[in-house]
Amino acid sequence: MTILKQKDFTEHTNPRLAAGEQQEKDVAFYLRRAFKNNENFLVLNDYRFTFNEEIAQIDHLVVHRTGFIIIESKSIFGEVKVNSHGEWSRSYKGQWTGMPSPIIQAELQKDLLRKLMIANVELFLGKILGIQTQVTHREWDVLCTVSNNCILHREDIPKSISKQVIKSESVADEVKRIGGYSKIGSLLSTKPVFNDEELKNIGEFLLERCLSNVTTNVLSSTNHAEKLESETIEQPIVTKIEAIKEQPNNEKTISLACKKCGETEKLTAQYGKYGYYVQCGVCETNTSMKTPCPACGNPKSRIKKQGNHYWLTCDCSYNEVLFVNK
């Protein structure tokens, strides 16, 4: 269970956009080569999420045994300087101009992700002696990758920032240095460590909260007793959802009702330890969304979330909206 999310890159005619995509592609390549079969790391490229009415996009998110690494990619091909105040400047054809700090950008994304994880920690971490474990004091690191041919004037960059700025080709080594793990080493350390089940749960949680504007691929490892299910959210599903948004009165939904009182309107979608469910606003009863496939009766149908739409899908090609969270 390593590369949880990849990005479908497009060909840009705009040189600046093309350079940015190439930089992200390069970093994704180095991460994939290093961690594709490493069960101690989860990698999500181009991870987009929303929390507290804020939207964030992380170029590369790495989850390791002791924490999280947020990586901001910058396609800088000239020279880079950072002054003592942490202010960035770059050169292009001999002309120096200021630029936003990618470290500050990544820190903002990190803070929002941290708040999202803290607010939902009971969904992916368990309890010890009845006390809920937390992610608050896990390791939260930020890195900025620049193009391999960029010239970094490290002699002028503050040390605290210099160690966060690396060339693309060094990203895998730096991630290993930060998130390196061994069972023997963990016994000698006081750092809390995510176990296999917690890593799996974190991966599932992050994918469930991922905004659905890009294709998502889940790659599973045979080293886990309970494997993440291999799935691909294909473009036709995204297209279908967009059509529903344009014609909300034509939605085709399956009947979903509270198992206790039969309420069908005052229901709110939730996600918990056992998957998606709806909470009744009348009697407060929780009802699982899991239901046999209406087409073939398969009890192992799956729930897919896309925005506020919850789809019931089956291996028999059945694919319909089960519930719309209003």
Image (tube, helix red, strand yellow):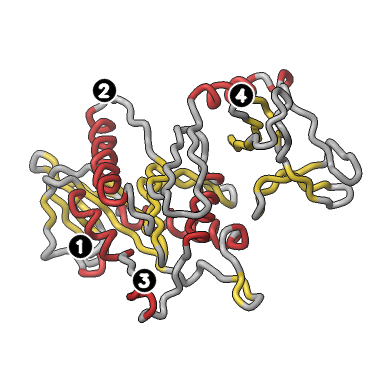
Judged left or right of residue 251, residue 185 is: left
Pointer 3 or 4: first along the chain:
3
Q: Position of residue 167 (x, y in %)?
A: 18, 52
Residue 245: image tag = none
Q: Nearer the viewer, residue 176 or 243?
A: 176
Residue placed farthest to the right in the image? 261
Determine the residue positioned at 70% across, 24% down: 296
Distance (Cα) linking label 1 and label 3: 41 Å
For mark 1, what is the residue? 83
Residue 316: image tag = 4
Kind of residue at badge 3: Lys
Distance (Cα) linking label 3 and label 4: 43 Å
Judge depth for marks 1 and 3 and give the one in front.
Answer: 3
Distance (Cα) linking label 4 and label 1: 60 Å
Image quadrant where residue 45 sits: top left
Instruction: Name the element at disc 3.
Output: helix
Q: Residues within 10 Å of mark 4 (few under 14, many from 20)?
A: few
Distance (Cα) linking label 1 and label 2: 34 Å
Kind of residue at badge 2: Thr
